[in-house]
Amino acid sequence: MIPRYSRPEMAEIWSPESRFRIWFEIEAHACDSQADLGLIPREAAKAVWEKGAFEIARIDEIEAETRHDVIAFLTNLAEHVGPEARFIHQGMTSSDVLDTCLAVQLSRAADLLLDDLGAVLESLERRALEHKNTVCVGRSHGIHAEPTTFGLKLAQAYAEFARGRERLAHARADIATCAISGAVGTFANIDPRVEAHVAKAMGLTVEPVSSQIIPRDRHAMFFATLGVIAGSVERLATEVRHLQRTEVHEVEEFFAKGQKGSSAMPHKRNPVLSENLTGLARLVRGYVTPALENVALWHERDISHSSVERVIGPDATLTLDFALVRLAGLIKNLVVHEDRMRQNLDRLGGLIHSQRVLLALTQAGLSREESYELVQRNAMKVWDGGADFREALAADAEVAKLLPAADLDALFDLGYHLKHVDTIFSRVFGDGATAAAAAETRSAAE
C-alpha cells in the first residue's frame, strides 16, 4: 500500500524489521523448548538470544544467491550466533516460521483494527444520541418514503459496525494459530511440545492439525471479515455522499479553513472523504477473492498462496485501518443541516403520511384496495400539480365522509413516527441510551 493511505502503526507490523524480528523470536523460543526437553544444549539456546541478530541488507544479499528467504535469514542469523547456530531450526520447515509469523502479524493487525472500530462506534454513538430526534425523511429507491430521524440512521450504522467488530474478534481468534510441525505436519523430527511452547510465547494457540502449513480457510475467513467491514464503510460513506448532494444538502463533510474543493471552481465543497472511503472499501473487498482461492492448495502444500498473501496481508489491513480512522473522523466532524432536513421532509406536501391515511380508511370500513385507490388518486394530484395532500384529501368527498377534519389532522402528526425511537435506541445502545441522550441535550443547552 502506498504511504498516502498507510498509518505508521499498521505499517510497522508489516515492515521487514518486524517480520525478521518475529522470525527470530520463533526460532529462539523453539530453541528454548528443545533445550528444556534435553534435545539441544542449554548453552546453544542461550547463545541464540544473546548473540542473535540480523541485517536486512545482508539477508537480501544472501537471498539474491539462494533464492530462499528463510535460508537467507538463517544464514545471516548463524553469522552472528556462531557454532551453536547448528541447533537452530532443528526439525522445522520454512512454513513453520512463515505461517506462525503471519499469524502473529494478522493478530496484531486485527488488534489495531478492533481499536479503530471502537473509535468509529464511539463517534457514531455520540452523533446518534445527539440527533436521536432530528427528524428527516426516509427514502426507499431514492424516493421519499416516511419520516425517520438522523439519529436512527446513525444507530443503524452503529449496530452494523458493532457486528463487524464482533466478527473481527472471532476472526482474530481463528487466525491466531501456530504450526511448528515439520515438513508434512507429522512432528516426525520435532516434538509437539515445542509447538505448544512457541504458541504460548507468541500469544497464539496450537493449530490442531496442519499439513506443512496452517489451513487457509482460516485466512479466507479473516479477509472475508475485513471485506464485510469494508462493505459497511462504503454503505455509510455512500449515505453521506447522497445526503451531501446539492439538491439534498442534509449533511456535509467538515470543510476546513483554507481547504479547496476544485482547481477550476472555487465554490465547490465536495464529499472527498466519503468518496475516498468508497474507493478504499472496494480495494479491501477485492482482496477477499484471492484469499478464498488460496484455500485449495496441492496436497500438503504448494506456494501459490504465498505471493498472494505477501500482497493482501499488508494491503488489506493497511487500507482498512486507514479507512476506519478516516471514517471515525468524518462522523465526528460531520455537519448536520437540521433545517434542510425539515425542508426536504415537507417537499412533497405531506405525501409521507400516505400510509397512515390508507390504514385509517381500512379501519373506517373500506377494503384495502378501495382505500389504496382513494389515497393514490389524491397523492397523484400532489405529485403532478404541487397540491397539498391534506387539503386534497379533505376536498375528496369519499375521504371526507369517512375521515372528519380532526381525524385527518391527527394522521399528519410527525410524532406518531417517532414513538418507538427510544425502544430502538435501547436495543442498540442499551438501557442507558435515554439517559445519555438526556445528558447530551442538557450539555448542549448549557
Image (cartoon, rainbow, N blue to C red):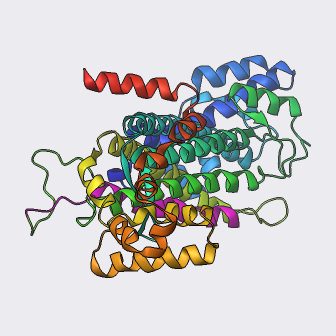
- Is 279 one of the magenta-colored residues? yes
Number of numbered labels in the structure image: 0
Where in the figure is residue 424, as x and y percent of width and height? 56, 41
Answer with left or right where residue 167 lies relative to residue 96.
Answer: left
Q: Looking at the picture, does residue 291 appear above or below residue 182?
A: below
Where in the figure is residue 229, as x and y percent of width and height? 55, 52
Query: Residue 173's quadrant in the figure?
Result: top right
Q: Is residue 320 visible?
A: yes
Query: Residue 397's quadrant in the figure?
Result: bottom left
Residue drawn where x is 73% and y is 34% of the image: 86
Query: Residue 163's quadrant in the figure?
Result: top right
**In the foreground, 104 or 421:** 421
Answer with left or right where residue 7 lies relative to residue 61.
Answer: left
**In the foreground, 384 or 408:** 408
Residue drawn where x is 55% and y is 53% of the image: 63
Where in the figure is residue 8, as x and y percent of width and height? 39, 39
**In the foreground, 358 or 277:** 358
Q: Looking at the picture, does residue 354 appear above or below residue 240?
A: below
Where in the figure is residue 33, as x and y percent of width and height? 79, 24
Quadrant, the C terminus: top left
The majority secondary structure of the magenta stretch comes to helix
Which region of the structure is painted magenta?
Answer: 266-293
Residue drawn where x is 49% and y is 54% of the image: 315
- Is 263 one of the magenta-colored residues? no
Quadrant, the N terminus: bottom left
Answer with left or right where residue 434 lies relative to residue 75.
Answer: left
**In the foreground, 405 or 314:** 405
Q: Is residue 14 visible?
A: no
Q: Looking at the picture, does residue 266 appear above or below residue 392?
A: above
Answer with left or right where residue 333 lies relative to residue 328.
Answer: left
